[in-house]
C-alpha cells in the first residue's frame, strides 16, 4: 500500500475552539504580537512546538498508575533507568524536569568564562546555558546546513574541518566538551549521519575532549540514518540508536520530544567526577537523584514512551507525515528548508518576504500572519530568537525561518491540509506583510517574553 496511515486510533478527543479573524486580531494585540503570549485555547492548530505536546498512549496513561512517589529509591526511577540504558548505556543517569535543567546543571559544573563549546548548532536554551557561564557557544554546522534551498541528506552534520580548526584556535584545554545536536533543531530539524558522529568522535579523541549528544530527537535521527545512510537499511532502529550513543561520553535529553512524554529530561555521562558534582547540583536545584524534579509517574510515562518511540511503524508514520506537510507547502511555491526535517517544516521567511529586512524580523511577521489568517501558531527561528548578542549588539541570524513543529501523534491529515491552505492564503498576500520591531525585550531569550509591534510606516 502507498498510503502510510497513522499507526493508532483515537480513543479520547479534545475539542478545538473555532475563532474569527476579528477575535484573532484582538488576541494578537493583547499578546503584543508575541505568539508565546497567546492563550492556547485561542489557537486552532498549535504548531508552536513538538515539545511536551505528544499524545500519550493508553499504555503510558496506565503506566502513570504504577508511579511510585517515594522520595528516594523509587522503583519508577529504576524502570526509567532500565528504559534509558537499553538505548543509551551511560554509567550515570541524572533525571531532570526537562532538557534545559540538564543543560543548566551540566554547564554550571563543566564550563566557565574561559571556555568554548562547539556544537553543530546550539538550541536556544543550550546557547543561553553556555553563555550564562560566560562561555562561548560556537555553531559549526556544515555549509549546506546554512542554506535552506540546498538538498543534502544530513544537513545537521558537524563541519569536521571547522571543528578541528576551532579546537586548535581556542586550545583543547579551553574546551570542556563538544556537543552534537540530533536532529539539529535550530538548523531545520536536520539529521546527523552516523559517519559524522563517528568523525566528530575521532576529532574529539585527537584532543582528549568528551563528546556529548543533545539527544532530544534521537529516534527521528536514527530513522533518517536507516532511510538515507548506506549500510543501515536493514539494521533495527534500536541498534542504530545504540551505535549513535556508543560514540558519546554523555548526553542531555528532553523527554518532551522523543521521550513521548509531556515533561521530563535527563543528563547522562560516563565521567564519575562530573556525575558526582552534577548530582550535588541536582539536589540543590531539582530534587533528589532518583526523581530530579519529576513525579514517579512521569518517570513511568517516559519509560514506556522510550519503548514506543523506537517502533518502526511509528517512526515511518512520523517522518512521512512531516514530509507530507512539507511537500504540499512547497507545491504552492512557498520556500521551505529542504529536505524536510523530522519534527517540523521550516518556511524560509527571509526568501518569502524579501521586502522585510532581517532586523525587522520577517519570520515574526510571517508567524503573526499565519495566526491572524488561520489560527495557526508557529514559531520564529531567526533574528528575533538569535539576533541579540550577549554584548547587546544586534545582527541578522544565519536564517529567518518560521517553524511549524508537528506534535507527535496529535493532529490528523485533514488538520494538516487546513494548515497547507492557510499557508497558501498568506503566501498569496505576502507583499502586504510588514516588518516588526521590539518595543520591550529582556537581555536573554527575548523571543519568549519580548513585546513586538509593526514598524511604523512600513
Ligand atoms: C535540540 C534541543 N535541545 C534542548 C532543548 C531544551 O529542552 P526543554 O524544552 O525540555 O528544556 C530543546 C527544546 O526544544 C531542543 O529542541
Image (cartoon, rainbow, N blue to C red):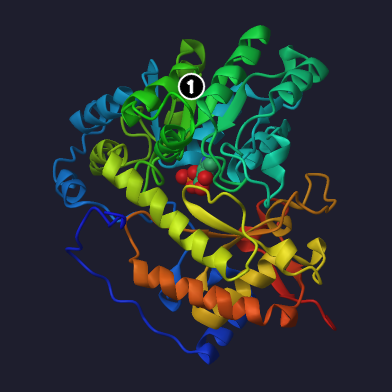
The part of the image, by quadrant, that contains residue 9 is bottom left
272, above or below 111, in the image: above
Question: Residue at left 53%, top 51%?
Answer: 340
Which residue position is annotated with label 1? 250
Question: Residue at left 33%, top 61%?
Answer: 410
Name the residue furthest front: 1
Q: Secondary structure at mark 1?
A: strand
349, above or below 156, in the image: below
Say whether mark 1 is within 8 Å of ligand 1. Answer: no
Give left or right: position of 252 versus 321. right
Q: Position of residue 370 (x, y in %)?
A: 57, 75
**Front one among 125 and 407:** 407
Q: Residues within 10 Å of mark 1 (few under 14, many from 20)?
A: many
132, above or below 40, in the image: above
Q: Position of residue 43 (x, y in %)?
A: 45, 75
Q: Position of residue 131 (x, y in %)?
A: 70, 37
Instruction: Please identify the quadrant where the N terminus is shown.
Output: bottom left
Give left or right: position of 66 versus 370. left
Residue 48 in view (yes/no)? no
Residue 151 in view (yes/no)? yes
Count all numbered tags in the image, as a single digit.
1
Question: Residue at left 45%, top 78%?
Answer: 42
The part of the image, by quadrant, that contains residue 17 is bottom left
Q: Position of residue 344 (x, y in %)?
A: 50, 54
The part of the image, by quadrant, that contains residue 450 is bottom right
Give left or right: position of 422 versus 399. left
395, above or below 359, in the image: above
Question: Residue at left 62%, top 20%?
Answer: 177
Instruction: Please identify the quadrant where the C terminus is shown.
Output: bottom right
Amino acid at each position: 500500500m502507498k498510503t502510510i496511515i497513522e499507526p493508532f486510533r483515537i480513543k479520547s478527543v479534545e475539542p478545538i475552539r473555532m475563532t474569527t479573524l476579528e477575535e484573532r486580531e484582538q488576541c494578537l494585540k493583547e499578546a503584543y504580537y508575541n505568539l508565546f503570549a497567546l492563550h492556547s485555547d485561542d489557537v486552532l492548530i498549535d504548531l508552536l512546538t513538538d515539545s511536551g505536546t505528544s499524545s500519550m498512549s493508553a499504555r503510558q496513561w496506565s503506566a502513570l498508575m504504577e508511579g511510585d512517589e517515594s522520595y528516594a529509591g523509587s522503583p519508577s526511577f529504576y524502570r526509567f533507568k532500565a528504559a534509558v540504558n537499553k538505548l543509551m548505556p551511560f554509567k550515570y543517569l541524572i533525571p531532570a524536569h526537562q532538557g534545559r535543567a540538564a543543560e543548566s546543571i551540566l554547564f554550571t559544573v563543566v564550563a566557565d568564562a574561559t571556555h568554548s563549546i562547539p556544537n553543530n548548532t546550539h538550541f536556544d536554551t543550550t546557547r543561553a546555558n553556555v553563555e550564562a557561564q560566560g562561555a562561548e557557544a560556537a555553531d559549526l554546522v556544515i555549509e549546506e546546513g546554512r542554506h535552506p534551498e540546498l538538498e543534502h541528506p544530513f544537513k545537521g552534520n558537524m563541519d569536521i574541518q571547522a571543528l578541528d580548526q576551532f579546537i586548535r584556535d581556542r586550545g583543547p584545554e579551553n574546551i570542556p566538551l563538544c556537543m552534537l545536536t540530533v536532529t539539529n533543531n535550530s538548523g531545520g530539524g536536520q539529521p546527523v549521519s552516523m559517519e559524522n558522529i563517528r568523525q566528530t568522535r575521532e576529532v574529539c579523541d585527537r584532543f582528549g575532549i568528551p563528546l556529548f549528544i543533545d539527544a532530544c530527537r534521537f529516534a527521528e535521527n536514527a530513522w533518517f540514518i536507516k532511510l538515507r545512510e548506506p549500510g543501515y537499511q536493514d539494521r533495527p532502529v534500536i541498534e542504530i540508536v545504540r551505535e549513535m550513543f556508543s560514540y558519546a561520553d554523555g548526553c542531555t535529553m528532553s523527554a518532551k520530544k522523543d521521550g513521548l512524554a509531556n515533561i521530563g529530561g535527563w543528563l547522562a555521562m560516563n565521567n564519575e567526577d562530573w556525575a558526582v558534582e552534577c548530582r550535588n547540583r541536582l539536589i540543590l536545584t531539582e530534587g533528589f537523584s532518583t526523581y530530579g524534579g519529576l513525579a514517579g509517574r512521569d518517570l513511568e510515562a517516559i519509560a514506556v514512551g522510550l519503548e514506543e518511540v523506537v517502533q518502526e511503524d511509528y517512526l515511518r508514520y512520523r517522518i512521512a507525515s512531516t514530509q507530507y506537510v512539507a511537500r504540499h507547502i512547497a507545491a504552492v511555491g512557498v520556500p521551505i528548508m529542504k529536505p524536510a526535517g523530522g519534527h517540523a517544516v521550516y518556511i524560509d521567511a527571509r526568501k518569502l518576504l524579501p521586502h522585510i529586512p532581517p532586523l525587522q524580523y520577517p519570520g515574526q511577521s510571517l508567524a503573526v500572519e499565519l495566526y491572524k489568517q488561520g489560527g495557526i501558531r508557529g514559531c520564529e527561528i531567526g533574528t528575533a530568537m538569535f539576533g541579540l548578542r550577549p554584548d547587546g549588539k544586534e545582527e541578522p541570524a544565519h536564517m529567518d525561518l518560521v517553524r511549524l513543529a508537528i506534535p507527535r501523534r496529535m493532529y490528523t491529515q485533514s488538520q494538516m491540509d487546513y494548515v497547507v491552505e492557510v499557508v497558501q492564503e498568506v503566501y498569496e498576500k505576502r507583499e502586504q506583510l510588514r516588518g516588526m520591531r521590539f518595543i520591550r525585550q529582556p537581555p536573554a531569550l527575548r523571543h519568549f517574553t519580548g513585546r513586538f509591534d509593526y514598524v511604523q510606516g512600513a
